[in-house]
């Protein structure tokens, strides 16, 4: 069977040394095993390589001094042992694999994820490919999105944010129809953890003038609640829909 392989990212050293991370495919479900290999080609002179960093990268916004800045950074870092001296023009292939974190942001709207390679001996010498790998939601996250959509919401936007040193993804839903069309401007879901449990932060933004005034007088935390589902519950769309609507209703009182 032919496996589509694509060079996702690479780094070229000052001596002409070239390192490419080549993946089996370009679409992955969060939690899936990523397999590929490093293609290393020697430059003009021989060079010793101990290891190479493979990094799962994303872009995100971060608040700093009351300003919002756009940055990019590593979500995961894997050290691939090479331990070889590469001769001029020599070619070397080193396989690798790793498990994509369950908390990896999915590819929606302005959310981009890519995989990079760099030498551990020269942390500033790196080059990223412009093409992102596509990250597909897990079954659990798909169930959550579907449950909210069946309540009349549409997924309007998504944004990656970094708070307290951790990158999370915020999904914004707009009530197009249903019981919340006239009472809610939008709701925002941030998934905090998808490992042993599915932990979500739900923020409700009411639309009525009375609730809006109440919102101005209160902290955002009072319109935000945290919801946790077990791995068994995450497959029950009706249960998820019930819990989320109950949480929304409590914030509208």
Image: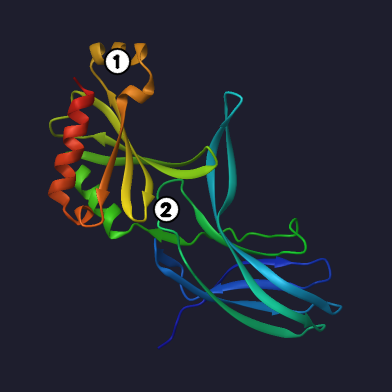
Residue at which label 1 appears: 212
Q: Earlier in the sequence, mark 1 or mark 2?
A: 2
Secondary structure at badge 1 equals helix
**How many residues crowd mark 2 within 10 Å: few (<14), some (14–19), many (20+)?**
some
Name the residue: 20% across, 23% down.
183
| The N terminus: image quadrant | bottom left
Q: Position of residue 208 (x, y in %)?
A: 23, 16
Please name whichever residue, 21 or 50, is drawn nearer the observer in this view of the structure: 50
Name the residue: 21% across, 35% down.
176
> Could you tell me if residue 250 is visible in this image?
yes
Q: Position of residue 179 (x, y in %)?
A: 13, 30
**Residue that sits furthest to the right in the current view:** 45
| 224 w.r.t. 81: above or below | above
Nearer to us of marks 1 and 2 is: 2
**Residue that sits furthest to the bottom in the current view:** 1
| 71 w.r.t. 14: above or below | above
Residue at which label 2 appears: 103
Name the residue: 26% across, 56% down.
231
| 144 w.r.t. 78: above or below | above
- Distance CA(mark 1)–CA(mark 2): 32 Å
């Amino acid at each position: 069977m032919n496996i589509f392989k694509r060079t996702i990212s690479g780094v070229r050293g000052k001596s002409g040394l070239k390192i490419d991370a080549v993946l089996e495919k370009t679409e992955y479900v969060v939690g899936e095993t990523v397999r590929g290999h490093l293609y290393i080609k020697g430059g003009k002179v021989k060079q010793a390589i101990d290891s190479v960093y493979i990094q799962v990268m994303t872009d995100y916004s971060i608040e700093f001094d009351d300003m919002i800045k756009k940055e990019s950074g590593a979500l995961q870092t894997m050290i691939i042992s090479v331990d070889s001296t590469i001769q001029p023009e020599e070619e070397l292939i080193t396989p690798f694999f790793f498990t994509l974190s369950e908390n990896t942001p999915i590819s929606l709207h302005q959310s981009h994820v890519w995989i990079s390679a760099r030498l551990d001996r020269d942390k500033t010498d790196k080059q990223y490919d412009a093409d992102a790998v596509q990250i597909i939601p897990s079954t659990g996250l798909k169930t959550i999105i579907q449950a909210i959509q069946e309540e009349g919401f549409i997924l309007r936007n998504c944004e990656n944010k970094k708070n307290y040193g951790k990158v999370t993804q915020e999904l914004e839903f707009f009530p197009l129809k249903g019981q919340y069309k006239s009472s809610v401007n939008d709701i925002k879901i941030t998934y905090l953890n998808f490992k042993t449990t599915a932990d979500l932060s739900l923020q409700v933004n009411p639309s009525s003038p009375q609730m809006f005034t109440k919102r101005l007088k209160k902290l955002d935390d009072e319109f935000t609640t945290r919801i946790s589902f077990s791995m068994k519950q995450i497959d029950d769309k009706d249960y998820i829909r019930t819990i989320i609507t109950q949480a929304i209703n409590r914030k509208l009182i």
